Image (spheres, rainbow, N blue to C red):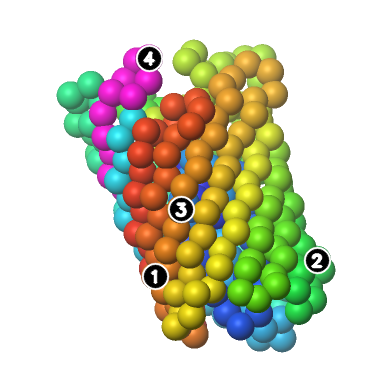
Amino acid sequence: MRGLHSQEVALARTSGVRPRIGGVALVGWVILRASGVARADHGMMMSGTDHATSEITAGLAVEAAGYSNALYVGTYQGVTPSLGWMYGRFGTTAAISLYHVDENGRSVRGLGDAMLGAHAIVVATDSLEVGAGLHLMLPTGSEPDNLGMGHAMAIPSAWLAWRARPLTVTASAGYGRALVALGGTQHVHGAGPLVDPMNLQELTWSAGAEVDVGHGVQLGARTSGAAPLGAGQLRAICGGRVAWATPRVTTGFELSAGVAGDPFTVRGVVETTLRF
Protein backbone atom coordinates (compact mmCIF):
# COMPACT_ATOMS: atom_id res chain seq x y z
CA MET A 1 0.00 0.00 0.00
CA ARG A 2 1.32 3.18 -0.44
CA GLY A 3 1.28 7.08 -0.86
CA LEU A 4 -2.25 9.09 1.51
CA HIS A 5 1.92 6.78 2.22
CA SER A 6 3.33 9.54 -2.47
CA GLN A 7 1.15 11.45 -1.24
CA GLU A 8 1.13 13.44 -2.10
CA VAL A 9 -3.83 10.66 -6.63
CA ALA A 10 -3.00 13.42 -7.55
CA LEU A 11 -4.51 10.96 -7.81
CA ALA A 12 -2.36 8.81 -5.54
CA ARG A 13 1.18 9.75 -6.35
CA THR A 14 0.30 12.30 -9.09
CA SER A 15 0.16 16.09 -8.98
CA GLY A 16 -0.84 18.97 -11.17
CA VAL A 17 -0.24 22.72 -11.27
CA ARG A 18 -2.88 25.19 -12.39
CA PRO A 19 -3.06 29.00 -12.27
CA ARG A 20 -4.93 28.64 -8.96
CA ILE A 21 -3.41 27.12 -5.86
CA GLY A 22 -2.80 23.35 -5.94
CA GLY A 23 -4.72 21.38 -3.28
CA VAL A 24 -3.29 18.51 -1.25
CA ALA A 25 -5.33 15.47 -0.19
CA LEU A 26 -4.02 12.65 1.98
CA VAL A 27 -4.64 9.03 1.18
CA GLY A 28 -2.92 8.00 4.20
CA TRP A 29 -0.64 5.77 0.10
CA VAL A 30 0.09 8.64 -1.73
CA ILE A 31 3.29 10.10 -4.40
CA LEU A 32 2.17 9.80 -4.77
CA ARG A 33 3.37 6.92 -2.53
CA ALA A 34 5.91 10.69 -3.72
CA SER A 35 4.63 8.72 -4.09
CA GLY A 36 1.64 10.05 -5.97
CA VAL A 37 0.05 7.06 -6.57
CA ALA A 38 -0.57 5.87 -3.00
CA ARG A 39 2.94 5.45 -1.46
CA ALA A 40 4.78 4.80 1.79
CA ASP A 41 3.90 8.29 2.87
CA HIS A 42 0.33 7.78 1.80
CA GLY A 43 0.31 11.26 0.55
CA MET A 44 -1.78 12.35 -2.43
CA MET A 45 -1.41 15.47 -4.54
CA MET A 46 -4.41 16.80 -6.38
CA SER A 47 -4.50 19.52 -9.01
CA GLY A 48 -6.34 22.72 -8.31
CA THR A 49 -9.46 23.23 -10.39
CA ASP A 50 -12.06 25.71 -11.51
CA HIS A 51 -14.70 25.02 -8.87
CA ALA A 52 -17.57 25.39 -11.37
CA THR A 53 -16.42 22.72 -13.82
CA SER A 54 -15.81 19.00 -14.09
CA GLU A 55 -12.33 17.56 -14.65
CA ILE A 56 -10.98 14.05 -15.21
CA THR A 57 -7.35 13.19 -14.51
CA ALA A 58 -5.46 10.10 -15.67
CA GLY A 59 -2.03 9.37 -14.27
CA LEU A 60 0.81 6.89 -14.59
CA ALA A 61 3.68 6.56 -12.10
CA VAL A 62 6.77 4.37 -12.42
CA GLU A 63 8.97 3.80 -9.38
CA ALA A 64 12.10 1.94 -8.34
CA ALA A 65 13.40 1.51 -4.80
CA GLY A 66 15.94 -0.34 -2.72
CA TYR A 67 15.33 -1.46 0.86
CA SER A 68 17.17 -3.11 3.72
CA ASN A 69 15.70 -4.10 7.08
CA ALA A 70 16.18 -6.74 9.75
CA LEU A 71 14.62 -9.50 7.63
CA TYR A 72 14.78 -8.50 3.98
CA VAL A 73 17.24 -6.89 1.57
CA GLY A 74 16.36 -6.20 -2.03
CA THR A 75 14.74 -3.92 -4.56
CA TYR A 76 11.33 -3.37 -6.08
CA GLN A 77 9.86 -1.69 -9.14
CA GLY A 78 6.25 -0.59 -9.56
CA VAL A 79 3.87 0.79 -12.17
CA THR A 80 0.74 2.58 -10.96
CA PRO A 81 -2.09 3.79 -13.19
CA SER A 82 -4.56 6.15 -11.51
CA LEU A 83 -7.82 7.88 -12.36
CA GLY A 84 -9.57 10.83 -10.76
CA TRP A 85 -12.69 12.91 -11.24
CA MET A 86 -13.38 16.35 -9.80
CA TYR A 87 -16.67 18.26 -9.97
CA GLY A 88 -16.76 21.61 -8.23
CA ARG A 89 -15.27 21.05 -4.80
CA PHE A 90 -15.77 17.28 -4.73
CA GLY A 91 -13.62 14.53 -6.19
CA THR A 92 -12.89 10.82 -6.29
CA THR A 93 -9.71 8.87 -7.01
CA ALA A 94 -8.64 5.28 -7.70
CA ALA A 95 -5.22 3.68 -8.15
CA ILE A 96 -3.56 0.27 -8.10
CA SER A 97 0.08 -0.79 -8.48
CA LEU A 98 1.78 -3.71 -10.18
CA TYR A 99 5.09 -4.66 -8.53
CA HIS A 100 8.19 -6.71 -9.16
CA VAL A 101 9.96 -7.37 -5.84
CA ASP A 102 13.32 -9.02 -5.15
CA GLU A 103 13.44 -10.09 -1.51
CA ASN A 104 16.55 -11.94 -0.31
CA GLY A 105 17.11 -13.23 -3.84
CA ARG A 106 13.50 -14.36 -4.36
CA SER A 107 11.59 -12.70 -7.20
CA VAL A 108 7.86 -11.91 -6.82
CA ARG A 109 5.43 -10.20 -9.19
CA GLY A 110 1.88 -9.12 -8.45
CA LEU A 111 -0.63 -6.41 -7.59
CA GLY A 112 -0.30 -4.23 -4.53
CA ASP A 113 -3.23 -3.01 -2.45
CA ALA A 114 -5.72 -0.88 -4.40
CA MET A 115 -6.78 2.60 -3.31
CA LEU A 116 -10.19 4.27 -3.56
CA GLY A 117 -10.84 7.76 -2.24
CA ALA A 118 -13.16 10.73 -2.01
CA HIS A 119 -12.28 14.28 -1.03
CA ALA A 120 -13.80 17.75 -0.78
CA ILE A 121 -12.44 21.31 -0.75
CA VAL A 122 -13.93 23.02 2.30
CA VAL A 123 -12.30 26.45 2.03
CA ALA A 124 -11.11 27.99 -1.24
CA THR A 125 -9.63 31.46 -1.75
CA ASP A 126 -7.00 32.86 -4.11
CA SER A 127 -4.27 32.03 -1.60
CA LEU A 128 -5.66 29.18 0.55
CA GLU A 129 -7.37 25.84 0.12
CA VAL A 130 -8.43 23.53 2.94
CA GLY A 131 -9.99 20.13 2.41
CA ALA A 132 -10.77 16.70 3.83
CA GLY A 133 -10.81 13.21 2.40
CA LEU A 134 -11.49 9.56 3.11
CA HIS A 135 -9.50 6.80 1.44
CA LEU A 136 -9.71 3.03 1.53
CA MET A 137 -6.88 0.60 0.89
CA LEU A 138 -8.29 -2.70 -0.38
CA PRO A 139 -6.47 -6.05 0.17
CA THR A 140 -5.75 -6.87 -3.47
CA GLY A 141 -2.05 -7.52 -2.78
CA SER A 142 -0.72 -10.87 -1.57
CA GLU A 143 0.21 -10.72 2.13
CA PRO A 144 2.46 -13.87 1.99
CA ASP A 145 4.42 -12.26 -0.85
CA ASN A 146 4.78 -8.96 1.06
CA LEU A 147 2.71 -7.12 -1.56
CA GLY A 148 -0.31 -6.28 0.63
CA MET A 149 -1.48 -6.01 4.22
CA GLY A 150 -4.10 -8.73 3.94
CA HIS A 151 -6.93 -6.50 5.16
CA ALA A 152 -8.58 -3.19 4.31
CA MET A 153 -7.42 0.14 5.74
CA ALA A 154 -9.46 3.32 6.19
CA ILE A 155 -7.69 6.69 6.22
CA PRO A 156 -9.60 9.92 6.91
CA SER A 157 -7.45 13.02 6.50
CA ALA A 158 -7.34 16.81 6.28
CA TRP A 159 -5.03 19.03 4.20
CA LEU A 160 -4.28 22.63 3.38
CA ALA A 161 -2.34 24.49 0.72
CA TRP A 162 -1.23 28.12 0.88
CA ARG A 163 0.19 30.05 -2.05
CA ALA A 164 2.08 33.33 -2.29
CA ARG A 165 3.51 33.31 -5.79
CA PRO A 166 5.88 31.77 -6.62
CA LEU A 167 5.75 29.66 -3.42
CA THR A 168 3.19 27.00 -2.50
CA VAL A 169 3.24 25.35 0.94
CA THR A 170 1.22 22.23 1.74
CA ALA A 171 0.52 20.17 4.85
CA SER A 172 -1.73 17.26 5.75
CA ALA A 173 -2.62 14.98 8.65
CA GLY A 174 -4.58 11.74 8.78
CA TYR A 175 -5.49 8.67 10.77
CA GLY A 176 -5.07 5.19 9.35
CA ARG A 177 -6.79 2.16 10.85
CA ALA A 178 -7.10 -1.46 9.83
CA LEU A 179 -10.69 -2.62 9.37
CA VAL A 180 -10.07 -5.66 11.57
CA ALA A 181 -10.07 -6.27 15.31
CA LEU A 182 -6.80 -4.72 16.46
CA GLY A 183 -6.38 -7.28 19.23
CA GLY A 184 -6.78 -10.21 16.88
CA THR A 185 -3.90 -9.99 14.41
CA GLN A 186 -0.67 -8.04 14.46
CA HIS A 187 2.07 -7.54 11.92
CA VAL A 188 4.80 -9.61 13.49
CA HIS A 189 7.58 -7.33 12.30
CA GLY A 190 5.91 -3.95 12.57
CA ALA A 191 4.75 -2.06 9.53
CA GLY A 192 4.03 -3.96 6.34
CA PRO A 193 4.09 -4.85 3.50
CA LEU A 194 7.51 -4.29 1.90
CA VAL A 195 6.22 -2.14 -0.97
CA ASP A 196 4.02 0.23 1.00
CA PRO A 197 4.26 -0.26 4.75
CA MET A 198 1.59 0.86 7.20
CA ASN A 199 0.85 0.05 10.82
CA LEU A 200 -2.49 -1.40 11.91
CA GLN A 201 -3.28 1.98 13.50
CA GLU A 202 -1.30 5.17 12.93
CA LEU A 203 -1.28 8.93 12.59
CA THR A 204 0.00 10.12 9.20
CA TRP A 205 1.45 13.50 8.24
CA SER A 206 3.11 15.31 5.37
CA ALA A 207 4.50 18.75 4.59
CA GLY A 208 6.05 20.28 1.52
CA ALA A 209 6.96 23.42 -0.36
CA GLU A 210 7.23 24.11 -4.09
CA VAL A 211 8.54 27.07 -6.05
CA ASP A 212 7.55 28.05 -9.60
CA VAL A 213 10.81 28.93 -11.34
CA GLY A 214 9.23 29.86 -14.66
CA HIS A 215 8.44 28.22 -17.99
CA GLY A 216 6.18 25.68 -16.25
CA VAL A 217 8.96 24.28 -14.06
CA GLN A 218 8.48 23.71 -10.32
CA LEU A 219 11.09 22.69 -7.73
CA GLY A 220 10.06 21.36 -4.37
CA ALA A 221 10.81 19.33 -1.25
CA ARG A 222 8.55 17.07 0.78
CA THR A 223 8.59 15.09 3.99
CA SER A 224 6.02 12.59 5.24
CA GLY A 225 5.63 9.82 7.73
CA ALA A 226 3.50 8.04 10.30
CA ALA A 227 3.52 7.35 14.02
CA PRO A 228 1.98 4.08 15.28
CA LEU A 229 -0.80 4.08 17.83
CA GLY A 230 0.05 1.07 19.96
CA ALA A 231 2.29 -1.64 18.51
CA GLY A 232 4.09 -0.66 15.33
CA GLN A 233 6.96 1.25 13.83
CA LEU A 234 7.60 4.94 13.29
CA ARG A 235 8.53 5.80 9.72
CA ALA A 236 9.54 8.96 7.89
CA ILE A 237 10.80 9.90 4.44
CA CYS A 238 12.06 13.09 2.82
CA GLY A 239 12.86 14.00 -0.75
CA GLY A 240 12.98 16.50 -3.56
CA ARG A 241 10.91 16.90 -6.70
CA VAL A 242 11.15 18.64 -10.05
CA ALA A 243 8.14 18.93 -12.37
CA TRP A 244 7.15 20.53 -15.65
CA ALA A 245 3.52 21.53 -16.21
CA THR A 246 1.30 22.67 -19.05
CA PRO A 247 -2.43 23.40 -18.76
CA ARG A 248 -3.17 19.73 -19.56
CA VAL A 249 -0.10 17.67 -18.68
CA THR A 250 2.23 17.54 -15.67
CA THR A 251 5.36 15.37 -15.58
CA GLY A 252 7.55 15.10 -12.52
CA PHE A 253 10.46 13.23 -10.97
CA GLU A 254 10.84 12.68 -7.24
CA LEU A 255 13.81 11.20 -5.36
CA SER A 256 13.20 10.22 -1.72
CA ALA A 257 15.17 8.66 1.12
CA GLY A 258 13.86 6.71 4.09
CA VAL A 259 15.05 8.38 7.30
CA ALA A 260 13.15 6.25 9.86
CA GLY A 261 11.38 2.92 9.93
CA ASP A 262 13.09 1.37 6.87
CA PRO A 263 10.28 2.03 4.33
CA PHE A 264 13.10 2.03 1.73
CA THR A 265 16.65 3.29 1.47
CA VAL A 266 16.21 5.32 -1.75
CA ARG A 267 13.22 5.55 -4.10
CA GLY A 268 12.77 7.32 -7.42
CA VAL A 269 9.37 8.03 -8.99
CA VAL A 270 8.54 9.38 -12.45
CA GLU A 271 4.91 10.41 -12.89
CA THR A 272 2.75 11.93 -15.59
CA THR A 273 -0.79 13.30 -15.17
CA LEU A 274 -3.19 14.22 -17.98
CA ARG A 275 -6.19 16.47 -17.28
CA PHE A 276 -9.20 16.66 -19.57
Quarter residue 110 falls in: top left
Q: Nearer the viewer, residue 271 or 54?
A: 271
The reply to whether the C-beta atoms of the residues labelled 3 and 2 are less than 8 Å apart is: no
Reading the chain from its start, which is encountered first: label 4 or label 1? Answer: 4
The disc placed on residue 122 is 2
- Reading the image, the residue beneath label 3 is 240
Q: For mark 1, does the 10 Å Cα neighbourhood hold few (<14), some (14 to 19), or many (20 or more) residues?
A: many
Q: Amino acid at mark 1?
A: Thr
Inspect this view and state whether residue 133 appears. no
Query: Residue 127: image x %, image y %?
Result: 75, 74
176 magenta-colored: no
- Reading the image, the residue beneath label 1 is 251
Q: Secondary structure at mark 1?
A: strand
Disc 3 from disc 2: Cα separation: 28 Å
Reading the chain from its start, which is encountered first: label 1 or label 3? Answer: 3
Q: Amino acid at mark 4?
A: Ala
The reply to whether the C-beta atoms of the residues labelled 1 and 3 are less than 8 Å apart is: no
> Which range is magenta?
68-78
Q: Is residue 256 above or below residue 52?
A: above
69 magenta-colored: yes
Q: Secondary structure at mark 4?
A: loop
The residue lying at 70 percent from left, 38 percent from top is 175
Disc 4 from disc 1: Cα separation: 35 Å
Reading the chain from its start, which is encountered first: label 2 or label 4? Answer: 4
- Report the mark closest to the observer, 3 or 4: 3
Query: Residue 249: image x %, image y %?
Result: 43, 78
